[in-house]
Amino acid sequence: MTAPRPRPEILTIHPYVGGESKLPGVNRVVKLSSNEGAFGAPPAAREAFARMTDELHRYPDGAATELRRAIGARFGLDPARIVCGAGSDDLIYQLCLSYGGPGTEIVMTEHGFSIYKIAGEYAGSRVLKTPERNLTADVDAILTAVSPATRVVFLANPNNPTGSMLPEAEVERLRAGLPPEVLLVLDAAYAEYVERPDYEPGIRLVDAGENTVMTRTFSKVFGLGGMRIGWAYAPPAVVDVLNRVRGPFNVSIAAQEAAIAALQAPGWVEQSRAHNTKYRAILARNLETAGIRTWPSEGNFVLANLATTKAAEAADAYLRARGLIVRRVGGYGLPHCLRITVGTEEEVALVSAALSDFLAGRRG
Ligand SMILES: *Cc1c(COP(=O)(O)O)cnc(C)c1O
């Protein structure tokens, strides 16, 4: 018997492992495993979604015209240079498929966001991971890895799951050191959370040339992960490519309406950022007090160093027994760590107390 067979490289791809959301036998689950934002979706976005129930038979506006206009107004960008996707993952796939391919290379950092590897291998590219320094992207290591076969370099800034960030000057140095024909993709999924003054999400570099793209998402600070919506800000030639290859109706009618409402919710981003900054520090301090090292994070999560894989496993099991789900990050080469989303005040207190009890129990 012969069976349909995919291209051989497809079967070497390791599927993406998402944050879990259910625990058998536990009624109340606190999910701190997917960085979904501490407050759910903005009320206006929920209302906009509910209003769409009579329109479900209608195709969406494939060009997402109103949404691109709203994004442009919010961020001071030309809507003609924005492309929307079913999550920024969608756009990352389209970029890899369009610019990568057999015989080409895609470069990412050692602990970079795992979708780059999946999408790059799907495209048929070889995906190279470059060493980091103290869990932070190393511009020189990236530049060293670039070869004539390199087509795309991905940098998540800030990065997930490490939380580390490159300042604007370093990203500029990266761009300046790359050949002009290499596409630099700056994934700024956590941009809204960053407070450091030396940060820039990528807009200036997109504007400065023809070879840099910035991707953004509604899945984090805007609390719309379940709606699947993200966007790219790109030079005209890249916008043209994405519009040729993307699904013609890749963003649903409800997602478009919810995203517009979320963008316009007064104070939502500011309040979320302020909460995150405060409780991220409290979470990190609580963990340090309990004897768990953390790394500085610019995102809405903290990477906790449990020192050994066994301890990370045991801590994860202990948390689960208490209804708390955090993220194991062995797939990112960090099996001794747990990534913990900054939740509400109560959730931060619960996860802090549980980890403190866990460590006290091990010492006692
Ligand atoms: C969460 C995340 C995304 C967003 O993915 P969506 O497909 O927009 O939900 C992109 N990049 C990084 C680094 C992320 O952590």
Image (tube, helix red, strand yellow):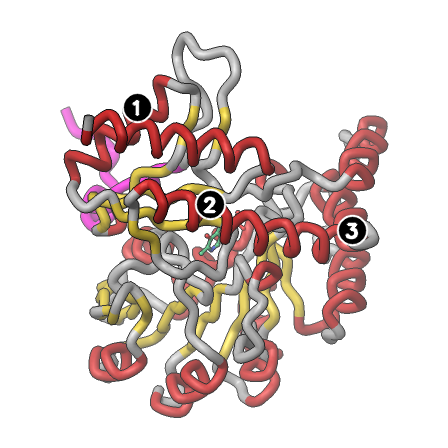
Q: Is residue 162 visible?
A: yes
Magenta segment's dominant SS is loop
Residue 256's x, y, as percent?
73, 47
Q: From mark 2 to mark 3, how far is it between C-alphas? A: 32 Å
Pick the quarter of the image with the N terminus: top left
The region drawn magenta spans 1-18
Question: For the residue marked with disc 3, what is the amino acid?
Answer: Ile
Q: Are marks 1 and 2 in contact (CB under 8 Å)?
A: no
Q: Can you tell which mark lies on residue 318?
A: 1
The residue carrying mark 3 is 260
The span from disc 1 to disc 2 (Cα, nearest Å) is: 18 Å
Instruction: Decide: few, some or many residues near mark 2? Use Cα within 10 Å; few <14, some 14-19, many ≥20.
Output: many
Q: Amino acid at mark 1?
A: Tyr
Q: Is residue 2 left or right of residue 247?
A: left
Residue occupied by mark 2: 283
Which numbered disc flags the more N-terminal residue, 1 or 2? Answer: 2
Point out which mark residue 359 bears.
none
Above or below for 303 versus 347: below
Image point (26%, 33%), residue name: 359
In this picture, residue 269 sits left or right of residue 103: right
Q: Quadrant of the C terminus?
A: top left
Q: Secondary structure at mark 1?
A: helix
Choose top left, top right, bottom left or bottom right for residue 44: top right
State whether residue 22 is above or below residue 200. Answer: above
In the rendered structure, which amino acid carries the disc numbered 2?
Leu
